[in-house]
Image (cartoon, rainbow, N blue to C red):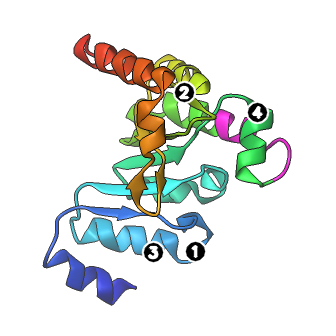
Amino acid sequence: ALAVLARMRREMDAIYFTGGEPLVRPDIVEILHEAHRLNFFPIYLGTNGLLLPLRDKVLDYVDRVVISLDSTDPGAWDGLLGAGPGQARRIYDVVAHYARNQRRRHISLMINCVITGDTIADVYRVMEFCFRHDVVFAPVAAATDSLPDRELFTRPDYQRLVRHIAELKRRGY
């Protein structure tokens, strides 16, 4: 993995580590350290957040941590995660903890929120959660076979959401 990073660095400046879940790799700290040593910038890490407290050292080598969060309803998010009851609350706590420590740790925290027909209403609450915790909100329309869900785009509630997000963007959020 380290030799691959060195070859990649000759061709690109930025790198995004994602998965699956990259924090399950036993060598993830070593890999991120090497990416940092090679001066990749920015270095992104995409995670569901559950293992972040156990792999906290990774934050010494990344610029932005992207945590997936599609719902603020613990029961619904637990169901989507399939990781067992109580995991959603752990993720909310992880986000809140690292959000408070962004400046001290020299990282930026971002929430990646996938929008589906079933989650449109909750996206507003995810946005509020992000704003309350000073975390970047990154909404993404659901895709099927790498293509946007065209049915989603035709829904009036989705169109209202997009207008709302655009208005917040215009106002500086």
The kind of residue on which mark 1 rests is Arg
Q: Answer with the quarter of the image where residue 88 lies.
A: top right
Label 4: element kind: helix
Question: In the rendered view, would you say 3 is above or below 111?
Answer: below
In the displayed orientation, state which residue is furthest to the right: 85
Question: In the rendered view, would you say 1 is above or below 137?
Answer: below
In what quadrant of the picture does the C terminus appear?
Answer: top left
Q: CA distance from mark 1 to mark 3?
A: 10 Å
2 vs 3, front mark: 2
Asked whether the viewer can see residue 173, the reply is no
Q: CA distance from mark 2 to mark 3?
A: 35 Å
**CB atoms at circles 3 and 4 under 8 Å apart?**
no
In the displayed orientation, state which residue is furthest to the left: 10
The kind of residue on which mark 4 rests is Pro
Residue at 50% x, 71% y is 28
Residue assigned mark 3: 30
Question: In the rendered view, would you say 130 is above or below 85?
Answer: above
Residue assigned mark 1: 25
| Number of residues whose C-alpha sits closer than 10 Å to that of mark 2, classed few (under 14), some (14–19) or many (20 or more) | many
Residue assigned mark 4: 74
**Considering only order in the chain, which callout, 3 or 1, is on the residue closer to the N terminus?**
1
**Looking at the magenta stretch, what is its main secondary structure?**
helix
| Lateral position of residue 26 relative to residue 60, left or right | right
Residue assigned mark 2: 123
Residue at 38% x, 24% y is 162
| Lateral position of residue 5 relative to residue 91, left or right | left
